[in-house]
Image (cartoon, rainbow, N blue to C red):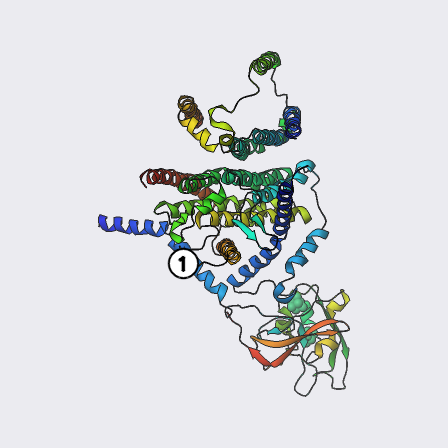
C-alpha cells in the first residue's frame, strides 16, 4: 500500500519535472493556432451577418392579421406594463377597418434609448400585436432616430417569421443616405461553428 | 579625452551624491543614489575594469537599490518627507563626518594614485575577470572568506531579529 | 590625423548603432501584430482584421492613435519621476543590444571588409546584459510610485520583489553557462557551441536542460510576461504600474516590454541553442557569403521560435498567484540552481 503510494508520488514528480501538464496545454493551444477551421469569428459587417433565433428580443414589431388589419387595439396595456415607461400609445376611433376593432392607435411609439428589451410589453398585449423582432442594428446618430413610431414598426420584417434563425447569412455592407446597413442574403446561410 | 570623460562622470557622481543627501523625498534620494552608482561604474570602465563596473551595476544598482526602493516605497511619504532625520544626533554625526573627511584626505594624500599594472601587464588588465578570480581565490582568500562570513552573520542576525519580534507578537 | 582603418571602424560602429536602434524601434510594430494574431488564433478567432489586409496596418493605426492621445499626468503625481520612468524602462532595453551579437564576423563582398555582426564584443558581455537588463525594473518601480495610485504602487512593489527573487536564479543560470562555455563573452559562448547540436549548451547533459529551465522561467518573470505578469495583473491591479500612463509614455513601456522579450529570446538562443551555429556538426563547403547568410537564417529562425514560444505560453497558461510566484523563485529555482551549479562544477573538473 505504502509502496504503491510512493511510486505514485514519484510519477507525479517526474511529470512535474518534465512539465507534462504545460506541454499538454501547449499542444492544445498550438492545435488551435495552426488550424484555420477552428476560427469561430463571424465576419459581421463585410461578409456575414448573424440571423438570430425566433426567441430573440430585438426591435419591436407591430403585427397585422393575415388580411392586413392592425392587431393593436390601443388598449395601452403594453405601456402600463413597461417597466421603463417607454411606450406611448394614443388611441383614436377608426371604423374603416384599419384595425381589428374600431379603436386603433393614433400614436404608438417606443423610445429605444430607455427600452431594456425585457419583453413585458409583448406579454401584456392581449392581441399579440406587439412582438419583439429580430432587428438588432439600432445604433443611430441622435436621440430622435431612436424613437420608433407606428409606421416604421408596422413594416414587414427583413427576416420572415417562418425562418427559425440561428444561422450566419451572407451579407454585404450598404451605404445609404442615413448611414450604413448590413443587408443579409437569407438564401445563403451556414451554421455557426462553436 | 579620457580625462574629459573622467571629469564628466566624476562631476555627475559628486552632484548626484550631494543630491542624495539634500533632497527631502526618500524616493528621489534613492534615485540619485542610483545615478551615483552608475557614474562610479562608468569610472570603473575608465579604469579598465569592466568586470567591476558590471558587478557594480549588477549588485548595487540591480539588486541593492531595488531592495532599498522596496523598503522606501512602503513608507508613509507624507510624514517621511517632513520629519527631521537626525533626532538630535547632529553634533556626534558632525564630528564623525569631520573625522571621516580628514581620514579620506589623509588616504588620498598618502596613497599611490598612479598604480602600476603589477605582474599581469596591460593586456591582462583589460581581460581582468580571470585575474580578479584568481587573485580572490588565492592571495586574498582569507579576506574573501571573512567577508562572506560577515555577510552570513548579518543574514542570520536579520533572521534572528525578525524571529524575535515575531515571538514577542505571539507572546502577547 | 587618424588613419583610414580607424575611421572605417568608427563609421562601421556608427552605422551599426543606427541600424540596430532603428530596427529595435520598429520591432514592436510587427511583434504586436504577430502577438495579436497568435492570441486570436489560439482563442479561435481571427485577431486584427479590418485595418489593411489581415489587419497588417493595425500597428500603424495604433501608433498614430497613441501619438495623438492626450498625455495625462495625474495631478498628485511626482512629475519628475513620472516623466522619467518610461525612459528608464526603455533605455536599458535598448542598451542591452549594444552587447548582443547576431552573428560572427562576416566578409562583405562588395566593400571587401570584415564586418562584425555585433556592436561590441565585451569580455564581460553576459554580465553587462544581466546588469543593464536589470535596470529596466526602475522604470516600473519608479513609474508605479510616481503615479501616486495604489494600483500602480502595488504593481511596482510586486515587480521589485519579483525581480529580486528571479534575478538570482537567472544569474546562476548565466554562471552555469559561463562554466559550460568557459567565457563571459557572448561571441565566445556561441563559438564554443559550434560542433553541431550536441555541443549546444542545452545538450550539456544532465545540467544543460536544467539550466535552460531555470533561465527560461526566470526570464519569463523578469520580463513580466504571463504566467508571471503580476505587476500588470489586470485581474487585481487594473493595469498595475501602467494604470496612470497614456499616450506615448504608455507606448514606451510597451516598447520596452517587447524589446526585452526579443533580447531574452536572443539570449536564450545564444546561451543554450548555439546562436548562429547550425545543428549539423559538418559544414558543406558553401561559399563564405552563403554560409554567413545561412548562419543568420539559423539564428533568426531560433530567435523567432522563442518569440513565438513566449506568445504561445502567454495565451496558454493562467497567471500564477503571487505567493506561488515567490515560492517558485525562492524555494525551487534558487536551491535547484545551487545544486546544479555544484554538479556543473564537478562535471567541469572531471570532463
Ligand atoms: S421591451 Fe420592456 S422596456 Fe422595452 S418597451 Fe417592452 S416592456 Fe418596455
Ligand atoms: S400593442 Fe397590444 S398592449 Fe399595446 S396598445 Fe396595442 S393592443 Fe394594447
- Residue shown at the point (61%, 37%) measured from the top left: C142
Which quadrant of the figure has residue B2? top right
* As drawn, A91 above or below C288: below
* As drawn, A109 above or below C324: below
- Which secondary structure, mark 1? helix
Q: At which x and y percent is residue C324? A: 44, 44
Q: Name the residue under label 1.
A: A24
Q: At which x and y percent is residue C11? A: 65, 45
State the quadrant of the C terminus of chain B.
top left
Asked if one can make out residue A82 in the rendered structure from this viewpoint, the answer is no
Ligand 2 quarter of the rendering: bottom right
Count of marks placed on residues: 1
Q: For this view, does A35 lie left or right of residue A131?
A: left
- Residue shown at the point (54%, 21%) measured from the top left: B115
Q: At which x and y percent is residue A37? A: 50, 70
Q: At which x and y percent is residue C116? A: 55, 47
Which quadrant of the figure has residue C10? top right
> Which chain does the residue under circle 1 lie in?
A
Other residues around mark 1 within 10 Å, as few (<14) / some (14–19) / many (≥20): few
Nearer the observer, B57 or B19: B57
Amino acid at each position: 500500500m505504502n509502496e504503491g503510494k510512493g511510486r505514485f508520488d514519484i510519477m507525479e514528480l517526474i511529470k512535474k519535472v518534465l512539465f507534462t501538464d504545460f506541454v499538454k496545454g501547449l499542444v492544445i493551444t498550438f492545435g488551435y493556432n495552426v488550424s484555420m477551421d477552428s476560427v469561430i469569428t463571424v465576419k459581421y459587417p463585410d461578409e456575414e451577418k448573424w440571423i438570430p433565433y425566433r426567441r430573440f428580443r430585438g426591435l419591436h414589431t407591430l403585427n397585422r392579421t393575415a388580411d392586413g388589419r392592425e392587431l393593436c387595439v390601443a388598449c395601452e396595456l403594453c405601456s402600463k406594463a413597461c417597466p421603463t415607461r417607454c411606450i406611448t400609445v394614443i388611441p383614436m376611433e377608426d371604423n374603416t377597418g384599419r384595425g381589428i376593432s374600431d379603436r386603433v392607435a393614433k400614436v404608438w411609439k417606443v423610445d429605444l434609448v430607455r427600452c431594456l428589451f425585457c419583453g413585458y410589453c409583448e406579454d401584456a398585449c392581449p392581441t399579440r400585436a406587439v412582438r419583439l423582432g429580430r432587428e438588432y442594428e439600432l445604433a443611430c446618430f441622435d436621440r430622435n432616430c431612436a424613437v420608433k413610431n407606428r409606421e416604421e414598426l408596422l413594416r414587414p420584417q427583413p427576416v420572415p417569421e417562418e425562418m427559425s434563425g440561428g444561422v450566419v447569412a451572407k451579407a454585404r455592407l450598404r451605404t445609404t443616405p442615413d448611414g450604413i446597413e448590413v443587408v443579409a442574403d437569407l438564401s445563403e446561410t451556414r451554421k455557426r461553428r462553436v | 579625452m579620457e580625462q574629459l570623460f573622467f571629469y564628466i562622470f566624476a562631476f555627475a557622481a559628486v552632484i548626484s551624491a550631494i543630491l542624495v543627501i539634500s533632497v527631502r523625498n526618500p524616493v528621489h534620494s534613492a534615485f540619485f543614489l542610483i545615478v551615483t552608482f552608475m557614474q562610479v561604474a562608468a569610472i570603473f570602465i575608465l579604469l579598465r575594469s569592466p568586470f567591476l563596473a558590471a558587478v557594480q551595476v549588477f549588485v548595487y544598482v540591480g539588486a541593492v537599490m531595488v531592495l532599498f526602493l522596496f523598503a522606501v516605497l512602503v513608507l508613509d511619504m507624507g510624514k517621511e518627507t517632513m520629519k527631521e532625520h537626525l533626532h538630535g544626533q547632529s553634533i556626534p554625526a558632525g564630528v564623525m563626518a569631520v573625522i571621516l573627511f580628514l581620514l579620506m584626505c589623509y588616504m588620498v594624500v598618502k596613497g599611490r594614485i598612479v598604480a602600476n599594472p603589477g605582474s599581469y601587464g596591460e593586456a591582462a588588465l583589460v581581460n581582468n575577470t580571470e585575474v580578479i578570480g584568481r587573485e580572490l581565490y588565492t592571495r586574498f582568500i582569507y579576506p574573501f572568506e571573512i567577508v562572506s562570513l560577515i555577510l552570513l552573520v548579518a543574514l542570520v542576525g536579520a533572521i534572528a531579529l525578525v524571529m524575535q519580534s515575531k515571538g514577542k507578537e505571539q507572546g502577547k | 590625423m587618424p588613419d583610414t582603418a580607424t575611421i572605417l571602424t568608427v563609421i562601421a560602429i556608427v552605422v551599426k548603432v543606427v541600424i540596430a536602434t532603428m530596427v529595435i524601434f520598429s520591432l514592436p510594430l510587427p511583434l504586436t501584430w504577430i502577438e495579436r494574431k497568435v492570441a486570436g488564433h489560439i482563442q479561435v478567432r481571427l485577431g486584427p482584421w479590418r485595418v489593411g489586409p489581415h489587419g497588417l496596418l493595425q500597428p500603424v493605426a495604433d501608433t498614430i492613435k497613441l501619438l495623438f492621445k492626450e498625455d495625462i499626468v495625474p495631478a498628485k503625481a511626482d512629475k519628475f519621476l513620472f516623466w522619467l520612468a518610461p525612459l528608464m524602462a526603455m533605455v536599458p532595453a535598448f542598451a542591452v543590444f549594444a552587447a548582443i551579437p547576431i552573428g560572427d564576423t562576416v566578409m562583405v563582398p562588395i566593400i571587401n571588409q570584415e564586418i562584425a555582426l555585433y556592436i561590441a564584443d565585451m569580455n564581460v558581455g553576459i554580465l553587462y546584459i544581466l546588469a543593464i537588463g536589470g535596470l529596466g525594473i526602475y522604470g516600473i518601480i519608479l513609474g508605479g510610485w510616481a503615479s501616486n495610485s495604489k494600483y500602480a504602487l502595488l504593481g511596482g512593489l510586486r515587480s521589485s520583489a519579483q525581480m529580486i527573487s528571479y534575478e538570482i536564479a537567472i544569474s546562476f543560470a548565466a554562471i552555469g553557462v559561463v562554466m559550460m562555455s568557459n567565457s563571459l563573452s557572448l561571441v565566445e559562448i556561441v563559438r564554443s557551441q559550434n560542433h553541431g547540436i550536441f555541443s549546444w549548451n542545452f545538450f550539456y547533459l544532465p545540467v544543460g536542460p536544467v539550466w535552460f529551465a531555470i533561465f527560461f522561467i526566470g526570464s519569463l518573470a523578469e520580463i513580466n510576461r504571463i504566467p508571471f505578469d503580476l505587476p500588470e495583473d489586470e485581474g487585481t491591479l487594473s493595469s498595475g504600474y501602467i494604470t496612470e500612463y497614456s499616450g506615448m509614455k504608455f507606448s514606451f513601456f510597451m516598447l520596452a516590454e517587447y524589446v526585452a522579450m526579443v533580447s531574452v529570446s536572443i539570449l536564450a538562443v545564444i546561451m543554450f541553442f548555439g546562436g548562429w551555429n547550425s545543428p549539423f556538426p559538418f559544414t558543406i563547403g558553401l561559399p563564405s557569403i552563403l554560409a554567413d547568410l545561412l548562419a543568420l537564417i539559423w539564428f533568426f529562425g531560433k530567435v523567432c521560435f522563442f518569440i513565438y514560444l513566449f506568445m504561445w505560453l502567454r495565451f496558454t497558461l493562467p497567471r500564477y498567484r503571487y505567493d506561488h510566484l515567490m515560492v517558485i523563485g525562492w524555494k525551487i529555482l534558487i536551491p535547484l540552481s545551487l545544486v546544479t551549479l555544484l554538479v556543473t562544477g564537478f562535471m567541469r573538473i572531471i570532463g
